Amino acid sequence: MAKNKEKLTIKIDGEEWQKALDKTFKKKQKEVNIDGFRKGSVPKEVYYEKVGIESLFYDAIDEVLKSAYQKALKESKITPIIEPMIDVPSVDKDSVTFEITLTGKPEITLGAYKDLKIKKEKVKVTDEEIDHEIEHLRNEFAEIKVKEDGVVEKGDTAVIDFKGYVDGKELEGARGVNFPLEIGSNTFIPGFEDGVLGMKVGETKTINLKFPSDYIENLANKEAKFEITLREIKERILPEIDEDFFEDLAYDKVTNEKELREELNKILTERKQDQIDGKYLNDVLDKAINNMKVDIDEDILHDEVHRIINQFEAQLKMQGITLEQFYELRKMNEEDLHKMMEPAALQRIKQRFLLEEVAEKENIEVTDEEVEKNAEHMADNYGITKEELIEAYGNKELLRYDAKMHKTLEFLKNN
């Protein structure tokens, strides 16, 4: 067994085991139906004879599991970093035996992590980038008007009725009435928006398309026919770069184009600086991790992968998608997703170990004030209160750990 693992045999017997059995019996007593007895009144001896004491074992094991784990922690020299592996090799009326495998941090040897000679880019904002940002702002404040004449062009919003057909039958869910389709948004399958380009109001046309190979299984690579009627065309009228535009932007002290360009230069510089700083820190971490020696066993990797998958599933739910629907759409299964997440999980584990080792070696600690400040910063990022953040974390020690890791990142970035 690896040095960072320890298997302990913990036996729960005597009064502790009997109390767990009795507690479980009292729960079962209220649920079981035995002829001649009302629910909740069957004697223990009769229950054992009719149902069997074995029916209590599963729930009784749950009752003593926490106690067994605490005993294992006291006996072990290992501080576990993931959930333990627990087996029950034997259980009977007198005792239950647990085999608890604890996994601690593996042996880590730090390499060079300071003065890594990594070059940081310099910020440069071009006139073309400022021009692009101005056009972006003009689009944000564009006025949408009905196009009285002409045809659908790129950038227009086409208001359409449509029906989709596959194998001569109307496709469920492929119908729309007065549907606003922005041309260039790539909302529908490839080729659909191209088919709308050039249409006139009142025109009806049929286009033949093919669903992509990576579409949902029952439609992938299928030939489809779409009947489209154009009801209305809306175009975007970009504002002039004038006083009204500057007023709409609401930038402080921006009253003309020269001041606008100066303000955008400042904004883009700050944005680029953040990106450069982020890339530089990632490069530092990558090089320090490559200089570090550590073997990550499968249990630690498996635990991190499942943590990432749980986070991924939560993100999907926010978009109204279940994990099962994701599997179907991507033609994947749980094993495929697990393998896909392994590289990210491995990198996260190594980064965490690196930061913990550097923090220990450099004696990096955080004050209560730094913990509070970091918590406020995190709460602002998540759009919640500091109290809600603390409740979500469960305790302040985890917040202290996060603050310490953040401080260690700053140390690495500046050394």
Image: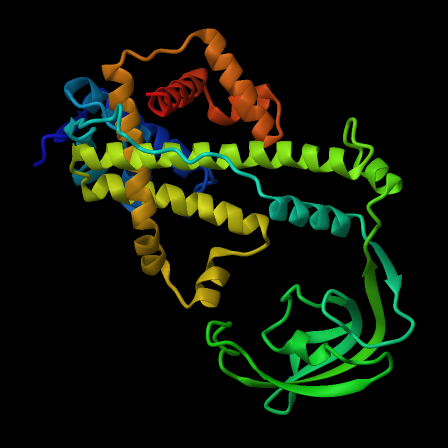
Asked whether residue 100 is in view, the answer is: no
**Residue appearing at x 44%, y 62% in the figure:** 327
Give coordinates of residue 254: x percent, y percent. Answer: 79, 31
Instruction: Count the marks.
Output: 0
Give coordinates of residue 185: x percent, y percent. Answer: 66, 63
Asked whether residue 13 is in view, the answer is: yes
Q: Is residue 160 above or below residue 361?
A: below
Please state, as top left, top right, bottom left or bottom right, where the C terminus lies in the image: top left
Please state, as top left, top right, bottom left or bottom right, where the N terminus lies in the image: top left
Give coordinates of residue 397: x percent, y percent. Answer: 40, 16
Q: Is residue 283 above or below residue 327?
A: above
Quick one: 30 or 386, which is closer to the camera?
386
On screen, residue 298 versus residue 215, left or right, reads left
In the orientation shown, which residue stands out farthest toward the right? Answer: 148
On screen, residue 319 versus residue 342, left or right, reads right
User: What colour scheme does the image use?
Assistant: rainbow
**Residue appearing at x 50%, y 62% in the figure:** 325
Quick one: 155 or 74, which is closer to the camera?
155
**Residue appearing at x 9%, y 30% in the figure:** 3
Q: Quadrant of residue 125?
A: top right
In the orientation shown, which residue stands out farthest toward the left? Answer: 1
Q: Quadrant of residue 401?
A: top left
Give coordinates of residue 324: x percent, y percent. Answer: 47, 60
**Residue appearing at x 14%, y 28% in the figure:** 107
Quick one: 183 or 73, which is closer to the camera?
183
Quick one: 4 or 109, which is closer to the camera?
109
On screen, residue 301 versus residue 186, left or right, reads left
Q: Quadrant of residue 339?
A: bottom left
